[in-house]
Image (cartoon, helix red, strand yellow):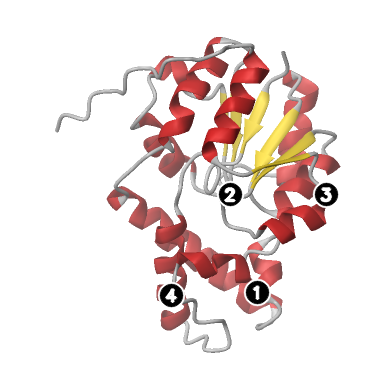
């Protein structure tokens, strides 16, 4: 069984509400009225077409878009502590099954500490990803995925944007897209993924099929006592 690799936000964790709030905050702080005024998380596909910074160049120049993305990442990292949830509940058991079998990795554009903290809300140490690569490590997403394929035999990358699909194919991996994340189904389809999964339950079933498990019970969550 080949190792699977996952994006985090929009795939394993639903951060759309937080991303929308921080988008609006950064837009106001930077006085970027040229950017769309998104009414709610459901409008995120309007700006998440591939790489966010490149998508924003439809309204602002690249340098401004890069500054906006950096500020947006800072705000979303700070706001993560107030997230009411960690992983999508349907995926806790399948991830534990993968950890006990071929292992899995996470390659994300979010900060390492943020992602690990949110994962640890619902996973035991044994169920955590074998490898976690974030925006804090050097190299492009394609480089990281190619390295995971070469060194660990990774076979597929699961993402939620057209950019994720293109990075997977560029690295020689199968591209699995989920339609419940940041991008529209149309954007995903245009990128040419090998498969599109509609819901977290569909992704959970696909993961279980990968491990050959009919049903993996969720691992007990770590204690959250304060």
Sequence-first disc among 4 and 2: 4
Q: Give the residue at mark 2.
A: 109
Q: Which residue is mark 4?
A: 24
Label 4 or label 2, whichever lies nearer to me, is 4
- Residue at 53% over, 10% down: 100
Q: Is residue 126 left or right of residue 213?
A: left
> What is the secondary structure assignment of the residue under circle 4?
helix
- Between the residue at mark 1 and the residue at mark 3, the CA separation in whole angstroms equals 22 Å
Q: Which residue is mark 3?
A: 192
Q: CA distance from mark 1 to mark 4?
A: 14 Å
Pointers 1 and 2 in contact (CB under 8 A)?
no
Q: Is residue 25 visible?
A: yes
Label 2 vs 3, first from the N-terminus:
2
Give residue 89's quadrant in the image. top left
| Mark 4 and mark 2: Cα distance apart in space | 19 Å
Nearer-N-terminus badge (1/4)? 4
Element type at marker 2? loop
Q: Quadrant of residue 150?
A: top right
- Say which of 26 and 20 sits in front: 20
Q: Which quarter shows the N terminus?
A: top right
Label 4 with label 3: CB-CB less than 8 Å:
no
Q: CA distance from mark 1 to mark 2?
A: 17 Å
Instruction: State the residue position of label 1.
Output: 56
Q: Give SS at disc 3.
A: loop
User: Which residue is pictured at 39% across the width and 24% down the height?
Assistant: 123
Q: Position of residue 206 (x, y in %)?
A: 64, 27
Mark toward the viewer: 2 or 3: 3
Quick one: 55 or 69, which is closer to the camera? 55
């Amino acid at each position: 069984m080949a190792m699977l690799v996952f994006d985090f936000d929009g795939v394993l964790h639903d951060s759309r509400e937080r991303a929308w709030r921080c988008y609006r905050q950064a837009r106001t702080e930077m006085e970027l009225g040229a950017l769309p005024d998104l009414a709610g998380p459901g409008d995120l596909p309007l700006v998440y077409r591939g790489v966010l910074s490149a998508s924003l160049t439809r309204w602002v120049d690249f340098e401004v878009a890069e500054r906006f993305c950096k500020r947006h990442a800072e705000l979303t990292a700070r706001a993560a502590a107030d997230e009411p949830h960690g992983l999508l509940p349907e995926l806790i058991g399948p991830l534990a099954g993968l950890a006990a079998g071929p292992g899995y990795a996470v390659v994300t554009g979010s900060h390492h500490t943020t992602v690990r903290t949110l994962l640890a809300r619902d996973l035991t140490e044994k169920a955590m990803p074998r490898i976690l690569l974030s925006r804090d490590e050097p190299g492009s997403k394609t480089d990281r995925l190619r390295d995971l394929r070469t060194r660990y035999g990774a076979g597929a990358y699961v993402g939620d944007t057209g950019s994720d699909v293109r990075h997977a194919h560029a690295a020689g991996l199968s591209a699995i897209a989920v339609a419940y994340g940041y991008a529209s189904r149309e954007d995903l389809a245009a990128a040419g993924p090998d498969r599109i999964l509609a819901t977290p339950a569909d992704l959970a079933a696909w993961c279980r099929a990968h491990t050959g498990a009919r049903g993996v019970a969720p691992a007990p969550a770590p204690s959250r006592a304060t």
